[in-house]
Amino acid sequence: MGIDKGIKTKGYFLAFIIPLLSLIFGALAGHIVGKHLSIPSLEVMAGFITLLLVSFFSFRRLKILDSSSSMAIKSVISDNRFSGSIESDEMRRYSEYFV
């Protein structure tokens, strides 16, 4: 079973990349504004606040993505515990009439 590659990539992007970039850019913006306003450690607060806000919206979008997509079976893997074939009821009835 597996998730479509595009959905998986979008999920990783929403869960990891967007929050990380928001932390970096928020801290950078806080550093620049803090330097001009002479407020020490503004980059820490700005980075943390942007991380929280963007993560909230990103995880909401991730939840919507999760509910709109489903897993699909891509391949069946054998574990070599059972080597015979399984016959359905329909096949048994069919073979009784024509054998």
Image (spheres, rainbow, N blue to C red):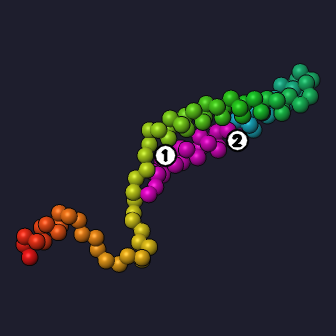
- Residue 97 image point, x, y percent: 7, 70
Circle 1 crowding by C-alpha within 10 Å: few under 14, some 14–19, many from 20: some
Q: Secondary structure at mark 1?
A: helix
Name the residue rendered at 79%, 29% in the picture. Answer: 46
Ranked by sequence position, the earlier of labels 1 and 2 is: 1
Q: Secondary structure at mark 2?
A: helix
Residue in the foreground of this view, choosing between 11 and 98: 98
Asked if residue 87 is positioned above or below residue 46 in the image, the reply reads: below
Residue type at the position of mark 2: Leu
- Residue 95 image point, x, y percent: 13, 71
Is residue 92 among the parts visible in the rendering?
Answer: yes
**In the image, 67: left or right of 60?**
left
Tell me where residue 41 sits by quadrant.
top right
Give me the C-alpha separation between circle 1 and circle 2. 19 Å
Q: Which residues are magenta?
A: 1-21
Residue type at the position of mark 1: Ile
- Quarter of the rendering occupied by the C terminus: bottom left
Name the residue rendered at 53%, 44% in the picture. Answer: 10
Badge 2 is on which residue? 20
Q: Is residue 5 magenta?
A: yes
Badge 1 is on which residue? 7
Q: Is residue 99 magenta?
A: no
Tell me where residue 18 sits by quadrant.
top right
Residue 21's disc number: none
Name the residue rendered at 60%, 35% in the picture. Answer: 58
- Residue 62 image point, x, y percent: 55, 38
